[in-house]
Amino acid sequence: MGRGSVRKPDPSLDLSQHLWHMDRLPRPWKAEQVFPQPGPVEVDVGCGKGMFLLQAALEHPERNYLGIEKQYNFAAYSAARVAKRQLPNARVVAGDALWVFREVFPDESLAAVHVYFPDPWWKKRHRKRRVMVEPFLRDVERTLRPGGALHFWTDVKEYFDETLQLLAQVTRLQGPVPVEERPARHDLDYHTNYERKARLAGKPVYRSLFFKPQESA
């Protein structure tokens, strides 16, 4: 499924606090320089149009959510959605998530990582562009604090199976814990736009949850 297009943000809307370029992130990482309030940080990798980011920030004001989106127009659109509501606990980074994990986040700094419907890059020669590759998964394990969670959903069975196998091979994350599908209460009651499209089309969605052990082996 293609990503489609998004509207440009209202030019009168101030995005300076909600939209960050990855080079602007503090190094070394200090969450208090990004979020005005204390709280655990969760990262939404490839946040797209920001459906999950927005709903999570609204439902859990005590937690901070950082969306990372490579396509600038989608990053700006997501930032505009949270800026309109002046949410202090949601920020969007325009840039490469793999670079941010590798270069910015220190060990045990994140409470959760969310990866929902990443691009499957169908062609074999393009597989190296996938986000769920060994270096990234190792960085997820490294940056999660003990007890922290990795959420991975996709509608591509082959991608799902390969990723779960890779997680078992290169990390000590515990899982997968199955995640049950819940009925939508209304037309927009979905984690992401991709989940909505898949379920309305009658396609299966593969969901998994992993946890970092409380103590290192």
Image (tube, grey):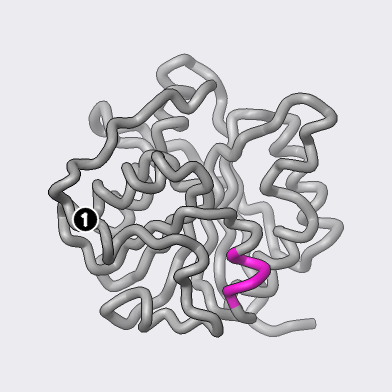
Chain part drawn in magenta: 100-105
Quadrant that contains the C terminus: bottom right
Judge whether residue 210 is colored magenta.
Answer: no
Given residues 12 and 172, the one toward you in this image is 12
193 in relation to 72, above or below: above
140 in relation to 37, above or below: above
Q: What residue type is labelled 1?
A: Ala
Is residue 143 visible from the viewing direction of this image?
yes
13 in relation to 118, above or below: below
Image location of residue 63, percent across then percent down: 34, 70
Left or right: where 185 falls relative to 161: left
Q: Mark 1 points at which residue?
A: 83
Image location of residue 5, percent across then percent down: 39, 26
Given residues 18 and 146, the one toward you in this image is 18
Image location of residue 205, percent across then percent down: 55, 31
* Identity of the residue drawn at 78% across and 64% down: 171
* Identity of the residue drawn at 32% across and 62% down: 90
Image location of residue 194, percent across then percent down: 46, 31
Count the marks: how many? Answer: 1
Is residue 59 visible from the viewing direction of this image?
no
Question: Which quadrant would residue 24 be assigned to in this image?
Answer: bottom left
Left or right: where 125 falls relative to 16: right
Seen from this angle, which residue lies furthest front? 11
Question: Which quadrant would residue 211 be assigned to in this image?
Answer: bottom right
Q: Is mark 1 on a helix, strand or loop?
A: helix
* Identity of the residue drawn at 83% across and 61% down: 170
* Identity of the residue drawn at 75% across and 30% down: 158
Left or right: where 14 falls relative to 74: left
| Label 1 neighbour load within 10 Å: few <14, some 14-19, many 20+ | many
Magenta-colored segment: predominant secondary structure: helix
